[in-house]
Amino acid sequence: ERPAYDEAWFESRATAGLRGLRAYDPGHDLVALRRRFDAQLLELGSNENPYGPSPAACEAVAGQLDALHRYPDPLGADFKRALAATHGVDTTQILLGNGSHELLMQLAQVFAGPGTEVVFSRYGFAAFALATMASGATLRVAEALPRTSTMPLGHDLDAIAAAITPATRLVYLANPNNPTGTWFGRAPLAAFMARVPLDVIVVMDEAYAEMADADADAASALPLLPAHPNLLLTRTFSKAYGLAGLRVGYLIGAPGLVAVMERIRESFNVNGPALAACEAALGDTEHLQWACARNAEQRVALTHALHARGLVVLPSQTNFVLVEFGPRTAAIEAALIERGVVLRPMGGYGLPDWLRITVGTAEDNRRLLAALDAVLA
Ligand code: PMP
């Protein structure tokens, strides 16, 4: 008899890890919402940068228009050189990805798999579970810090270290973390690395690192790399650089790690306009600092405004805040959608009473608060 060739049939033919796996959930059908609300849609659900990229990045994309019939440089050598100079590392320590999400997935594909374990924190970024499951490895989820701690729902590095077993191949950490916005300092991280077995690879997802306040002790793990070649960082151009649409992320790690990862890299995974734009964006530190300063200012203002409305807001060093709305959360979220305001529901993270709100411009945040006041009244 002819199979149905439906999702269930293809799933039955897929590798074990794919069974029961659900696709990454962006929260809403944004295409439909954009059609419905047009320019009036207030998109605060995806932690995008409302200030956009450096004008130099846009010019660089325009400069690529006569080369669209050519394959890009498969190694992105010029861009890698610029990244290496920026971070004070060697070009052999850098791997480019089609967004950092691609790199997070590939790390599990390369280093995990059936019979192995991957450790991460409850409320850790969603791609960690997705990558682990897709690889066929077993998830070991460490409990998050309690709500009463100074970093509620944040990573508990002690619990994460304790969850490591002889079967552990990878540990995923995010600093600061999405969706909680929480962070940890370099000293606790150094103490954690001292406890991690030398054959376990630690992935430090620093997607929001550029946005942390200088005095917040949420500093990058970059200085720890020379002492810990089993540690690597991932970064992205989607957040502080405002280039989410171009899909560029990168990894910094030991040259040997990069060499192994290169073996499964899709041959031209970062496109030409993206390479040119990101190299230009990297050179415009003024724009980066300006956007991060605006974000930090608005993060404080929005947090105060939400506190003033009696809401619980987790501490954040990112461009979003996680806010508790209680048992009415789903209704509040739906009512905001009707007003063209998109926030991110957190049911997928096991936090159905919370919504994640991207920090917008001053005007965005005024509109958000007005809609919220109407809905909460
Ligand atoms: N890591 C974290 C913590 C994120 O929040 C995101 C984006 N939501 C990513 C990685 C992936 O970003 P990208 O693939 O756009 O680089």
Image (tube, grey):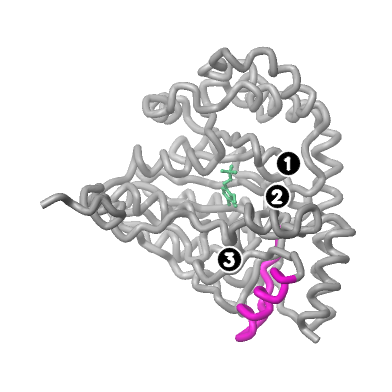
Q: Which residue is mark 3?
A: 154
> What is the C-alpha distance between the residues marked 3 and 1?
25 Å
Q: Earlier in the sequence, mark 2 or mark 1?
A: 2
- What residue did someone put label 1 on? 242
Rendered location of residue 63, percent (x, y)? 74, 17
Density class for disc 1 (Cα within 10 Å; few <14, some 14-19, many ≥20) is many
The picture places residue 247, in percent across and down from the top left corner, at: 60, 36
Which numbered dot is residue 48?
Answer: 2
Q: Secondary structure at mark 2?
A: loop
Q: Do callouts 2 and 1 mark residues in contact (Cβ within 8 Å)?
A: yes
Looking at the rendering, the stretch of residues picked out in magenta corresponds to 320-338
For disc 3, the neighbor class at 10 Å (few under 14, some 14 to 19, many from 20) is many
Q: Residue at horizontal 64%, vertical 34%?
A: 246
Number of numbered labels in the structure image: 3
Is 63 above or below relative to 331? above
Tell whether position 221 is magenta: no
Q: Which residue is at 68% across, 70% downward?
A: 314
